[in-house]
Amino acid sequence: MTETTLARADDEEERADGSGPGSGDPFDRDDLPAPRGATGALLRSLLAGHRSAVAVAALVLLVKEAAVQAGPLIVAYAIDRGVPAFRAGDHGPLIAVAVGYLLCAVGAGALQYGFVRGAARINQDVLLDLRGRIFRHAQVLSVDFHERYTSGRLISRSTTDVESLRELLSEGLQELIGVVLSFVSISLVLLWLDLGIG
């Protein structure tokens, strides 16, 4: 049976015994109280065992961003110094620029690959830990809880909500951190090149 079928069967059971959404029970409204800041505390506790891996992933992301931002600076050097030297018959600066840009591109790609692999490992370990916690917690809950909070909604919580967290960890945070780092690094480079224009 699928999750939807289980949830529908549970809803029919609720309506049959008169404990449907209109009964006033917070379990029926799926309006369970949670302490303020509980989500952040849970995420911090899940990541606590992976501090070194998170630090390495953050460092890799920083170095990758530096390699990406070095590309435009190398191009600027090529326009300002390499092209005039090439016209004067000196090919050295332009060759150095080409090699430097190639190294930055390859380095940024390799660092991005390393970051994605490291972040995926952290992501899967965190989700495994969370699923284990959910399972162990569900086992120690009272029979009264399992009678009031239906199995369909419990399955939905342990699959759909965990999947949402997976999407946040694997895509959302990476995109957010990447955008913030790009904004900060580009701003710093602009201010360093020309304070007034920056």
Image (cartoon, rainbow, N blue to C red):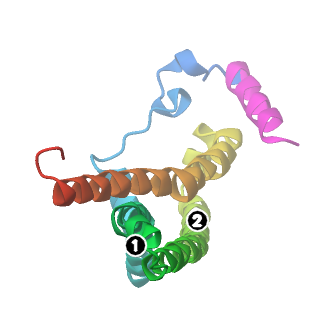
Q: Residue at x 25, y 52 (%)?
A: 187
Label 1 packing within 10 angstroms: few (<14), some (14-19), many (20+):
some
The residue under label 1 is 85
Residue found at the far right of this picture: 1
Q: Residue at x 30, y 59 (%)?
A: 185
Q: Position of residue 23 (x, y in %)?
A: 52, 19
Side (left or right) of 69 relative to 108: left
Looking at the rendered structure, the secondary structure element under dot 1 is: helix
The answer to whether residue 10 is magenta is yes
Q: Residue at x 35, y 58 (%)?
A: 181
Please tell me the numbered disc located at residue 11: none
Residue found at the far front of this picture: 88
Q: Earlier in the sequence, mark 2 or mark 1?
A: 1
Locate residue 11: give its quadrant: top right
Instruction: Look at the image and tell me in which quarter the N terminus lies.
Output: top right
* Magenta span dominant secondary structure: helix
The residue under label 2 is 127
Looking at the rendered structure, the secondary structure element under dot 2 is: helix
| Above or below: residue 16 compared with residue 92 | above
Locate residue 116: give its quadrant: bottom right
Q: Residue at x 59, y 38 (%)?
A: 148
Residue 30 visible (yes or no): yes
Q: Position of residue 50 (x, y in %)?
A: 44, 79
Discs 2/1, front? 1
Q: Check disc 1 and give the amino acid type.
A: Ala
Q: Position of residue 149 (x, y in %)?
A: 59, 40
